[in-house]
Image (cartoon, helix red, strand yellow):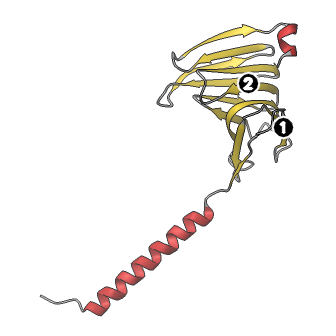
Amino acid sequence: GRRIPLRRFAAAAVIVVALAAAFMTYRVATAPFVHRFHNADTVAMHVAMPDGTDVWLSPGTTPSYDDTFRVDGRNVELDGEAYFDVEHDAEHPFIVHSCRQSVRVLGTTFNVQAYSNESENTVTLLSGAVGLDLLDREGELLRSLELHPYEQCHFDKRAGSYRLSELDALSLIHI
């Protein structure tokens, strides 16, 4: 049979390696930048989101979002506790993802307590309405709920169970 000259093979290998390197550089360069905050203080910290949403972070709380925030929907990852006053945008739901749950809103005020190292998440709705998806350990949907003002959902992540309660005026003071 014909032999492929070594020079041609080497030239083809160099081109393949160069294309692979260029592709990897392009992939790294186009990955969205992640904006991450951490409240290391002992008091609440205010963060103004790019869409005008106001967020107050409890101590030890870390939210993050990437550069696609206003394009692909307003997605925020949360570890900790934060109070959200969401700017209304019917075309771009605001979604807070935390340990085994997602909260979807269009414009409302609510509190999420979801520390990754605790067994229970708590979502408290103060105004508007939110959709709450509770997930199993594999990330599959367990239950979808809709909360109404002054409702609170306690989700036991270990048991996969939840309970709803209504808030009274005294409990609102402590949120």
Residue 31 drawn at (x, y percent): 61, 59
Q: Residue flagged by tag 2: what amino acid is it?
A: Val
- Asked if one can make out residue 87 in the rendered structure from this viewpoint, the answer is no
**Residue indicated by mark 2:** 130
- Tag 1 secondary structure: strand
**Quadrant of residue 94 in the image?**
top right
Residue 164 drawn at (x, y percent): 68, 10
**Residue indicated by mark 1:** 45
| In the rendered image, the vertical position of residue 42 relative to residue 132, given as above or below | below
Tell me what residue is drawn at x 82 percent, y 28 percent.
108
| Quadrant, the N terminus | bottom left
| Dot in front, 2 or 1 | 1
Residue 158 drawn at (x, y percent): 52, 19
Q: Distance between the residues labelled 2 and 1?
A: 23 Å
- Tag 2 secondary structure: strand
Tell me what residue is drawn at x 70 percent, y 25 percent.
113
Q: Residue flagged by tag 1: what amino acid is it?
A: Met
